[in-house]
Image: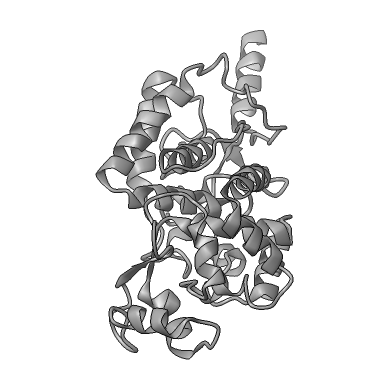
Amino acid sequence: MAASSFESAILIALLLPLTTSALSSNYYSKSCPNLFKVVYPVIAKAIKQQPRNGASILRLFFHDCFVNGCDGSILLDDTPTFTGEKTAFPNLNSVRGFNVIDDVKAAVEDACSGVVSCADILAIASLDAVYILGGPWWKLKLGRLDARTASRDLANKNLPAPSLNLKGLKTAFKNVGLSEKDVVVLSGGHTIGLARCVTFRNHIYNDTDIDPKFAANRQKTCPRSGGNNNLAPLDTKSSKIFDNYYYQDLVRRRGLLHSDQALFDDVATDDLVLKYSKNESAFFKDFGKSMIKMGNIKPVDGTPLEVRRNCRVVNT
């Protein structure tokens, strides 16, 4: 009878949802001591094969944290019981890099099975991607857990749209505990990567806060209709290098998205944009701080959590 009670207690413990705790810089020091050495070469290889992968991974982490916290929910495929975030309007035919995260997870599982969450893998992969492309390194804190569900509705509601003005951006960031400064700093992630024509068409044809020559150049590959998936660099000079040129573009009225140029349009954020356009070191320092702050966004209390063995599906 004692054995039966013990077995029942174990079963109950396994079924209870895990809860989040304070993140720590040495969270895996004993359970997976070589974690960073395992992740880095996988990310480096993916970026070498396709530099755009760096921006894609960074964006995955951003889009994950803005929907119920940094819980790896964006990685989940749809199931018969829920529709995940991959088909939300801001993500559909847009977010990418899932295969890279799959490769990282496989390597990590080989090194230390069942220990490292997919949410933490996203955080580490984002840090590595930024660093490999020439950006800053920050002291990453780990210990996140993975959600057992995802929400397309919350993704549609919470993710900032490329058409937002500064007020809309501030509201979207404030809703997840981020400041106006974080808006400017984290938008600097657009110094790498590409955007689809459908996301910037209205800006290059209808907005007035844009350099006419820049608009005309972008119109060559982004017609008024059709070509929705045609790509253009978010940074006109160095979209494969993490630097401060994004802010220099904004000062020249060459922001690709409406939401980009909204940061420098005779508004309260102009001074920060000017500062970062002239001082890359200041941008790098603040970017690390804002990434840590964003990475601290926790799932809502009561969210069922676990360490997934496969980032695309919950554990059975």
Observer-nearest of 63 and 271: 271
The residue lying at 39 percent from left, 77 percent from top is 198
Examine the rendered structure and indicate whether residue 242 appears above or below residue 213.
above
Residue 91, by quadrant, is bottom left
Residue 260 in the image: state x and y as whole percent. 55, 70
Residue 303 in the image: state x and y as whole percent. 65, 46
Q: Is residue 43 left or right of residue 181?
A: left
Residue 98 in the image: state x and y as whole percent. 37, 48
Is the N terminus in the top left, top right, bottom left or bottom right quadrant? top right
Q: Is residue 247 left or right of residue 98?
A: right
Examine the rendered structure and indicate whether residue 186 appears above or below residue 153.
above
- Does the rendering let one see residue 235? yes
Residue 16 in the image: state x and y as whole percent. 65, 33
Is the C terminus in the top left, top right, bottom left or bottom right quadrant? top left
- Does the rendering let one see residue 82? no
The residue lying at 61 percent from left, 50 percent from top is 283
Total numbered badges shown on the rendered structure: 0
Residue found farthest to the top: 2
Residue found farthest to the front: 278
The residue lying at 71 percent from left, 56 percent from top is 178
Q: Is residue 226 left or right of residue 138?
A: left
Colour mapping used in the image: one colour
Observer-nearest of 163 and 206: 206
The residue lying at 43 percent from left, 33 percent from top is 309
